[in-house]
């Protein structure tokens, strides 16, 4: 078994020499015992089994005295440096698990200049090693390491390393480090880091409210402002609405959507009026503003959305955003209850039908897709089919998808017809079979017949449609570009599949 570094070989030689020189004594020198202990523990830092036992054994040696700590740290530093020089590979060299445990081990020892130097070297390593290095430095009082710990934890892919980083961050979630935590928030934080950062705030009461309000109103990191604003809203703090309103005038792309959500979910009719006013200014972040209006969750908000969608004076982008992000979502499983009422639904569908004749092809396409989601297959299939005469490709593709979502025998039959006779919509029609709510509405036998078509594009689209219908990636051996005999066998398998399915 090879040694981790030249220093360990030297330690072994010293041990052997010491044993020879004390042959007359039954008890070896302490230094000899220590050298053997450290050498043995170091050999196992890469191993998966019982590795923590060896790591903790090294820590126990280093905790005996300052001299022992220096001895352990020296061996760790030499082994780590050798690993980095050799790229972390080769016999007797610390690999990633070993280097990670070196940093963990230093964190178990008292703060020491030699240990800090080794930890700072670890900050230049890969995230799995950087995490324990930054955690130890932060625990030793180096606040600058906290940001590196946050960055490495949010960026690492290894689940165990990420879990270790989050555990370290929870331990460091102290009031004195609040600012460092807030400064380290970014778009990756999400719901993972937020609860940890909130532990640095007062637990409850006026002091907590004031601290959160200060951050939500004026912190230089927009992600910190978002966290504080969402927390105020979740805790029912009245200040959340006022801060959200003040933020609406901001062009900050991070905070503004959050403010709109808060305002929409908590602000009532007054918020709906304010958000509608913002939409009528044709904002660049129309999706975020629409979401704010949607979350108001009242029929008044729905009526305002219909008014915006129908206003030809507004930019098509704004109207499309409202049609797609509001009207087309009335049947979502989590849609506010007022949007799911029959009268509200009928008003929205009527408005969408009117928009099918709009001068803007973008609006027409959005309305078609929205009808596919919330329309009536008995009433909306024919108007949608009429739009297939529109020469605009965008409209045709939207109609095809809408037909698939609406379903019904008429829609299914027309999709089959498009596969056979509409080259520009053929593949879109095949893909639309994935949206069909009921496969029995489709003349599946006709689709299988198209596998025998002499045109390769028709055969390709037909097999795509059949795989969508069967909810499977299995083509049952059919290759649309294969030889005739092979294709015939595939067709037979599809006919058998459909016969069994019908039975």
Image (tube, rainbow, N blue to C red):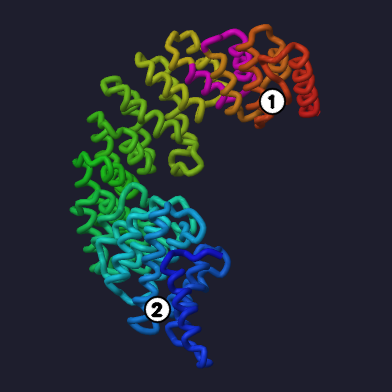
User: Quick check: 337 above or below 24?
Assistant: above
Residue 38 lies within the magenta run: no
| Position of residue 150 measured from the top left corner of the image (x, y, whole percent) | 34, 57
Nearer to the camera, 171 or 409:
171
Kindly identify the residue that appears in the image at 33 percent across and 45 percent down: 261
Question: Residue 481, can we see it?
Answer: yes
Is residue 228 left or right of 486 when viewed as pictured? left
| Among the 4 quarters of the image, the one containing residue 395 | top left
Residues rendered magenta in the picture: 397-424
Q: Determine crowd level at label 1: few under 14, some 14-19, many 20+ residues with C-alpha closer than 10 A.
A: some
Residue drawn where x is 75% and y is 22% of the image: 494
Q: Residue 352 carries which label?
A: none
Q: Is residue 204 visible?
A: no
Look at 57% across and 14% down and name the residue there. Answer: 426
- Residue found at the far bottom of this picture: 25
Could you tell whether 27 is left or right of 196 in the image? Answer: right
Q: Position of residue 263 (x, y in %)?
A: 29, 46
> If the image is split into quadrants, where does the N terminus sit?
bottom right
Residue bearing the label numbered 2: 62
Name the residue located 69 percent from the left edge and 13 percent from the top edge.
450
**Left or right relative to 35: residue 437:** right
Quadrant containing the C terminus is top right
What kind of element bears circle 2?
helix
Residues 275 and 401: in front is 401
SS for callout 1: loop
Mark 1 / mark 2, whichever is N-terminal: 2
- 323 vs 205, left or right, is right
Image mark for residue 475:
1
The nearer-to-camera label among 1 and 2 is 2
């Amino acid at each position: 078994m090879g040694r981790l570094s030249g220093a360990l070989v030297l330690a072994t030689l010293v041990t052997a020499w010491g044993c020879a020189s004390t042959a007359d004594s039954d008890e070896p020198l302490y230094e000899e015992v220590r050298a053997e202990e450290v050498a043995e523990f170091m050999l196992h830092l890469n191993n998966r089994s019982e590795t923590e036992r060896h790591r903790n054994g090294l820590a126990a040696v280093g905790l005996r005295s300052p001299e022992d700590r220096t001895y352990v740290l020296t061996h760790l530093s030499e082994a780590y440096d050798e690993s980095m020089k050799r790229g972390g590979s080769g016999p007797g060299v610390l690999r990633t698990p070993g280097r990670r445990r070196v940093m963990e081990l230093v964190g178990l020892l008292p703060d020491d200049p030699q240990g800090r130097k080794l930890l700072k070297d670890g900050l230049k390593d890969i995230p799995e090693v950087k995490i324990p290095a930054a955690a130890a430095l932060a625990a030793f009082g180096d606040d600058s390491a906290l940001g590196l710990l946050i960055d490495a934890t949010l960026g690492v892919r290894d689940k165990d390393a990420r879990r270790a980083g989050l555990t370290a961050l929870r331990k460091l979630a102290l009031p004195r480090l609040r600012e460092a935590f807030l400064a380290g928030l970014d778009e990756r934080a999400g719901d993972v880091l937020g609860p940890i950062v909130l532990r640095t705030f007062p637990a409850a009461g006026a002091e907590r409210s004031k601290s959160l309000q200060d951050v939500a109103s004026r912190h230089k990191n927009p992600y910190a402002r978002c966290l504080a604003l969402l927390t105020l809203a979740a805790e029912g703090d009245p200040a959340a609405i006022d801060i959200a309103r003040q933020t609406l005038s901001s062009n900050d792309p991070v905070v503004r959507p959050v403010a709109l959500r808060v305002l929409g979910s908590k602000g009532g009719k007054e918020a709906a009026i304010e958000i509608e006013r913002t939409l009528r200014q044709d904002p660049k972040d129309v999706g975020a503003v629409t979401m704010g209006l949607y979350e108001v969750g009242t029929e008044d908000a729905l009526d305002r959305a219909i008014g915006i969608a129908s206003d030809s004076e507004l930019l098509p982008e704004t109207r499309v955003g409202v049609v797609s992000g509001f009207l087309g979502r009335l049947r979502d499983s989590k849609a506010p209850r007022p949007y799911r009422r029959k009268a509200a639904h009928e008003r929205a569908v009527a408005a969408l039908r009117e928009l099918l004749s709009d001068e803007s092809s973008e609006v027409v396409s959005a309305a078609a897709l929205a009808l596919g989601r919330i329309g009536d297959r008995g009433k909306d299939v024919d108007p949608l089919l009429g739009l297939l005469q529109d020469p605009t490709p965008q409209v045709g593709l939207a109609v095809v998808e809408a037909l698939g979502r609406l379903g019904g025998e008429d829609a299914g039959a027309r999709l089959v017809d498009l596969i056979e006779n509409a080259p520009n919509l053929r593949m879109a029609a095949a893909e639309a079979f994935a949206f069909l709510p009921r496969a029995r509405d489709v003349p599946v036998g006709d689709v299988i017949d198209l596998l025998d078509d002499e045109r390769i594009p028709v055969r390709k689209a037909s097999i795509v449609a059949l795989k969508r219908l069967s909810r499977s990636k299995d083509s049952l051996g059919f290759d649309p570009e294969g030889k005739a005999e092979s294709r015939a066998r595939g067709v037979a398998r599809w006919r058998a599949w459909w016969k069994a399915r019908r039975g």
